[in-house]
Amino acid sequence: MSTNLDELDRKILIQLQEDASQSLDEIARKVNSSKTPVWNRIRKMREEGIIGAQTVILDAESLGFEACFFVLIRTSEHEAAWQAAFLEALNGRDEVQEAHRLAGDIDYILKVRVKNARAYDTFYQQLIADVRIHNVTALLSMEEIKSTTKLPIKSE
């Protein structure tokens, strides 16, 4: 379901994606509006679920998490009980930054951020101890070329 956003809403969202720590005054100035209408629109977009949690983006490598693996998972299990156990296993592991169920030959792809290959192996051993997996392929990212949380919202 898509929500109807007007030009001011899109400008506000662009500013929030750029830097959500900006003051309300700064955002209002940048979108050519006043503070109250901007605040009301932000509040409304939060209530509608367009704006979710506000967090900070940490630099993984600066904190020692130098290895990023993309983990391709194939399973022969597709029952609800297995899926629930798999979801529980993933939700219990902070190393998993993203998890997607896919169409095609691969059932799931995970983005896993760890300190090094040994830490990945520990993660892997724990995962396969928790849930039965038919095949796992881990791909080490050699270089992050682009990473963003921004959506391609266009202002007219």
Image: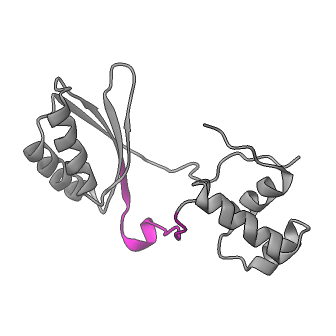
In the rendered image, residue 129, in percent from the top left (x then y), is placed at 8, 46
Q: Nearer the viewer, residue 154 or 126?
A: 154
Asked which quadrant contains residue 114, the reply is bottom left
Residue 67 belongs to magenta span: yes
Q: Which of 80 and 57 is in front in this view?
A: 80
Q: Which of 29 and 9 is in front in this view?
A: 9
57 vs 18, left or right, is: left
Point 20% across, 26% down: residue: 78
Could you tell me what secondary structure mostly forms the magenta stretch? loop
In the rendered image, residue 6, in percent from the top left (x then y), is placed at 82, 49
Q: Residue furthest right?
A: 32
- Magenta stretch? 53-69
Point 27% across, 54% down: residue: 91
Q: How many numbered badges does the structure rendering display? A: 0
Q: In this view, does 1 lie above or below 90?
A: above
Q: In this view, does 49 lie above or below 104?
A: below
- Coloring scheme of the render? one colour
Q: Which residue lies furthest to the top in this view?
A: 104
In the rendered image, residue 13, in percent from the top left (x then y), is placed at 72, 58
Q: Which of 86 and 116 is in front in this view?
A: 86
Point 12% across, 51% down: residue: 126
Q: Is residue 118 above or below residue 20?
A: above
114 vs 41, left or right, is: left
Q: Which residue lies furthest to the left in this view?
A: 129
Q: In which quarter of the image is the N terminus?
A: top right
Residue 62 belongs to magenta span: yes
Asked which quadrant contains residue 40, the reply is bottom right
Point 73% across, 80% down: residue: 23
Q: Is residue 153 above or below residue 26?
A: above
